[in-house]
Image: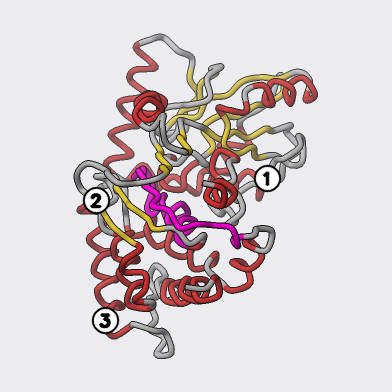
Amino acid sequence: MTLDTKKNTFVKLGKFLAQFKEGNCSKDETVFGNDLFFEKFIDLIQLSQSHNGWYTPEQVYFSIQSWADALTEKKLSQWLSNYDFSAVKPKKVALILAGNIPLVGFHDFLSVLITGHDVLVKTSSNDQHLLPFLANYLIASEPELKNKITFVEGKLEGFDAVIATGSNNTARYFEYYFKDKPSIIRKNRNSIAILNGKETKAQMTALGEDIFRYFGLGCRNVSKLFVPKDYSFEPFFEAIFEYQDVIHYEKYANNYDYNKAVFLMSNFKLLDNGFLTIKEDSSYGSPITSVFYEYYEDLKDLQERLENESHQIQCIVSNNLVKNSIDFGTTQKPNLWDYADNIDTISFLSTI
């Protein structure tokens, strides 16, 4: 199967996904496979929350649209233009996927297939339905993929390399278990925002998207703020007020009540707006429904610290205050070339 054939197959998938928007699923008669897949996908989206309580239709539709935007001929070609696959010898690559947000493992799945390898997938128990559905669509579009895609429920066997995503604890197990295989082992990471008090209200509102999208469960969600001394959080709370409806979601509300109670019983000083608590803390990973903050005095010193602790950080959001930072509101809209943990998956797969 040529690279162009594989790209065209994923472009078809992108056009299929583009039809599914929250409140406006509109069938395009020119899209391949609608007779078999369109209605079934709508049903699956509506059922997703019964499979995983955090997978509300709003969040699933957002993920779907993010992939529809990414899977275009232009973006796929731009992504792959810097690589040479001529020396790739097809191997069997095992994927151990997370399930914290919808389709979180799709990029690894795409990367393995686009580089010409076979994929052996072990889904998370929290996300067992969306990716297999899209895999069936791809196989219907290009039958040669049938022998290149395998989903496994039990023990992984007969693979040549592995990409595994988990916590710091599971990573230690993965590193031991897969020590004799080429691997990418992903651990806990968190995303941060650096503020200086000169941000616009629009930027602060967009920061709310970075915090609350997927209820804050992703590694690209902002879980910590760095602010200058004497920073006033009033503009921040005012700007994120439009996200207040998140507290009406029962699972989020339960976490909010629980984590707030734990903080208060420990006599921690909190700032609270009724749906988000913020707490001064040196850690990067805050509990869901909470964001940590820390004061800084000098941006140069802060950047040096962040570089030394880069293994803990996924994204940095700021108004160009430090290098390699991204715009407010974009953490959950990565490009195909924005690799998790800054590890180039395609380069890894091209050399195994």
> How far is the residue under mark 2 from the one under mark 3?
24 Å
Mark 1 or mark 3, whichever is nearer to me:
3
Q: Element under label 1?
A: loop
Question: How far from the left and from the top, in percent, is residue 246?
Answer: 39, 45
Which residue, given by chain and number where applicable, does mark 1 sit on? 326
Q: Element under label 3?
A: helix
Amino acid at dot 3: Leu
Which region shows up in magenta?
85-113
Q: Earlier in the sequence, mark 1 or mark 3?
A: 3
Mark 1 and mark 2 in contact? Answer it, CB < 8 Å.
no
Amino acid at dot 2: Val
Q: Residue at x 63, y 72 (%)?
A: 74
Q: Residue at x 41, y 76 (%)?
A: 16
Question: How far from the left and from the top, in percent, is residue 196?
Answer: 74, 31
Q: In the rendered picture of this protein, how many numbered marks are placed on residues?
A: 3
> How far is the residue under mark 1 from the one under mark 3?
40 Å
Q: Residue at x 58, y 24 (%)?
A: 293
How packed is label 1: few (under 14 Cα within 10 Å), some, or many (20 or more)? some
Q: Quadrant of residue 172?
A: top left
Question: How far from the left and from the top, in percent, is residue 2?
Answer: 52, 73
Does 92 appear in magenta? yes
Q: Element under label 2?
A: loop
How packed is label 3: few (under 14 Cα within 10 Å), some, or many (20 or more)? few
Amino acid at dot 1: Ile
Which residue, given by chain and number where applicable, does mark 3 sit on? 36
Q: Quadrant of residue 266?
A: top left
351 to 283, vertically: above or below: below
Which residue, given by chain and number where applicable, does mark 2 sit on? 152
The furthest residue to the top: 267
Q: Nearer the viewer, residue 291 or 27?
A: 27
